[in-house]
Image: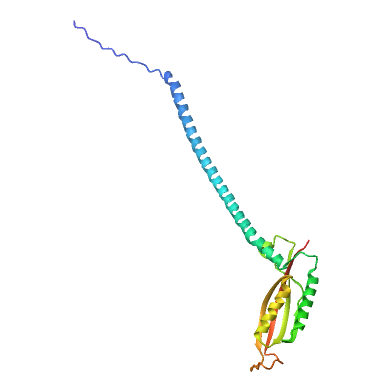
Amino acid sequence: MPKNNLKTSNITTIDWYVFIKPLIVLSLSIIMGIVIILSSQQYHNSTTEWKRQQNTLFGNVEKKYTQLNEALEIVNSLYLEKLKHLKKDGFLNESLLDIKEQRVKIFDKIVTFLKLQKKLFDVSYDFSKTKSYSVPDFLTSISQFKIYQIKINLKFGFLHEGDLLKLIKTIEFQLKSKGLFNLQTCDIKRIRDIINVKDVSQPYFEASCVVVWYVSKIEE
C-alpha cells in the first residue's frame, strides 16, 4: 500500500517583545528630534528679533548722536559766534547798570542830539515804556534770559532825503553801544511842491519814524 508523503511546514512565531525597546528608543529619538527642531526654530526667531531690536536701538542712538553733533557744530560755529557779536554790540547787558537807567541815558543822549540838529524842523519824540519781548525758541530753556524793547516815535521836518538817512545812522550809532537798533517804519511825506534850494527856512519833507531799541539781560 503506497505511503502518502506528508509535507509539514514550520510556522515561526514572532517575538514582539524584542522590538519594544528599539521602538521606544526610535520614538524617543523622533520626539527629541522634533523638540530640538522646534527649539532651534524658536531660538532662531528670538535671535532674529533680538538682532532687529538691537539694530533699531543702534539706529536711534546713531541718529541722536548725529543730531547732537550737528547741534554742537551749530552752537560752536553759529550761536557762540553770534553771542560774541551780541555782547560786543551791547545787546547782552552784563554790567550792573539797570535797564531803566540805560533807558534814561539813551533818552537823554538822543534828545540832546535832536536839539542840536539845525536841519530838522518841528522835532517831536516819544519814548514808550520798557516792554518785554518774546525770547527766541532756542533760548526758551534759559528762564533767566529776558529781552526788552523800547519804541522811539520820531516826527520831524527836513530839507533833503539825505538829512533823514544821516539822522537814522547817527541815532543807530548812539544806540549801538547799548543794544540792538532797528528802524521799524519810516513814512515820508512831501509838504512843498516847489523846491527852492536857496530857501532853507522851511522843510520840504516830513517824516514819521518808529525806531525800536532792543536790549537783553540774564536776571539772577
Place of residue 133 in the rendered image (x, y in percent of width and height, measured from the top left):
71, 69
Residue beneath the point at 54% across and 46% down = 55
Residue beneath the point at 81% across and 71% down = 101
Structure colour scheme: rainbow
Residue beneath the point at 49% across and 38% down = 41
Position of residue 27 relative to residue 120, above or below, is above
Q: Which of the 4 quarters of the picture holds residue 117?
A: bottom right
Query: Which residue occupies the foreground of this view, 187 or 51?
Result: 187
Place of residue 168 in the rendered image (x, y in percent of width and height, measured from the top left):
69, 79
Residue 135 seen in this snapshot:
no
Q: Residue furthest front?
A: 198
| Horizontal side of residue 19 vs 151, given as left or right | left
Position of residue 43 relative to residue 86, above or below, is above
| Horizontal side of residue 219 vs 205, given as left or right | right
Residue beneath the point at 63% across and 62% down = 78
Q: Which of the 4 quarters of the picture holds residue 196?
A: bottom right
Query: Which residue occupies the foreground of this view, 55 or 215?
Result: 215
Place of residue 195 in the rendered image (x, y in percent of width and height, measured from the top left):
64, 93
Q: How many marks can you see?
A: 0
Place of residue 89 in the rendered image (x, y in percent of width and height, measured from the top left):
71, 68
Q: Residue furthest top?
A: 1
Q: Quadrant of the N terminus?
A: top left
Query: Which residue occupies the foreground of this view, 202 or 214?
Result: 202
Q: Quadrant of the C terminus?
A: bottom right
Residue 70 seen in this snapshot:
yes
